[in-house]
Image (spheres, rainbow, N blue to C red):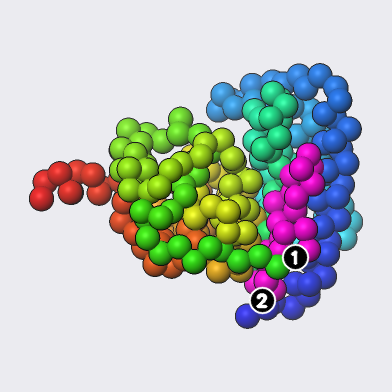
Amino acid sequence: MQRPDLEAFTTFAGTLADASGAIIREALANQRDFLTKNDASPVTEIDRQVETALRAQIAQQYPQHGILGEEFEPADLDAEWVWVIDPIDGTKAFITGIPTFGTLVALAFRGVPVLGVIDNPVTRERWIGADGIPSTLNGKPIRTRACTELANAILANGNPEPFDAAEQAAFQDLRSQTRWCVYGGGCHAYGRVADGALDISTDGGLDAFDYCALVPIVRNAGGVISTWQGEELTIRSGRQAIAASATPALHEQVLARLSTRAPALRASR
């Protein structure tokens, strides 16, 4: 069911993406120096500049809302409405000039993501999904592909490095059952599941600011997205391995393969 004011929130989320895109495109012409955070991931001044700008707009427009972002401390996570920001999802790609990065903006209602935006400032592709409103790509309605069998599915993985040994084995098991796999798409790949170009996308080691925006986009295009255990993704789900699939039937098969227990269980039969 559509929440009150969700259309107005969707319009506002678009203005946040506009602001982010303008900052990022200007930065692309310059040297993208970076620092290394405590978790060994890189961060640039542009990440922080974008998040600062978006937080300021949210605080001005919706001062009663909470904010969860990648680069700064969360604020009011117990608020009924919480904005979730990843200023540059794919910072390594941004630093190296590979245009698969994007800004992620989500809005959660009582912890559950109900609105999401994936904005690629280079390709100028923008996926938007909101509960009760069909997902769109640059304003045009999109749907997932009607794929129901792993053997026919095209798979995507942004980066296999975050998988632990058991997850890597489960992923390779899934990969062996699909048609083929494309790597390095990042958030872009989840937009492609929503618009029917891909059938499955899966990644490990993701935080709420990495996946909250993806949830409404995939879900409102007809797809399914969850943890590898089939659990709902919320602002409090923590670090997770996630999977998005084009159809419920396909997702059931994906989860059967991605359970970290699956390889051992099948080997013992």
- Against 28, residue 2 (above or below) is below
The foreground one among 81 and 245 is: 245
- Which stretch did the figure color magenta? 118-139
Whether residue 127 appears in this view of the structure is yes
Disc nearer the start of the sequence (2/1): 2
Q: Which mark is residue 140?
A: 1
Question: Disc 2 marks which amino acid?
Answer: Gly
Write down the quadrant of residue 95 in the picture. Answer: top right
Secondary structure beneath label 2: loop
Whether residue 80 appears in this view of the structure is no
Determine the main secondary structure of the stretch shown in magenta. Answer: strand
The foreground one among 243 and 185 is: 185
Q: Quadrant of the N terminus?
A: bottom right
Q: CA distance from mark 2 to mark 1?
A: 15 Å
Compared across the picture, whether 218 is left or right of 85 comes to left
Question: Disc 1 marks which amino acid?
Answer: Lys
Q: Which mark is residue 22?
A: none
The picture places residue 137, in percent across and down from the top left corner, at 72, 59
217 in the magenta segment:
no
The foreground one among 244 and 19 is: 244
Write down the quadrant of residue 196 in the picture. Answer: bottom right
Q: How many marks?
A: 2
The picture places residue 151, in percent across and down from the top left corner, at 36, 53
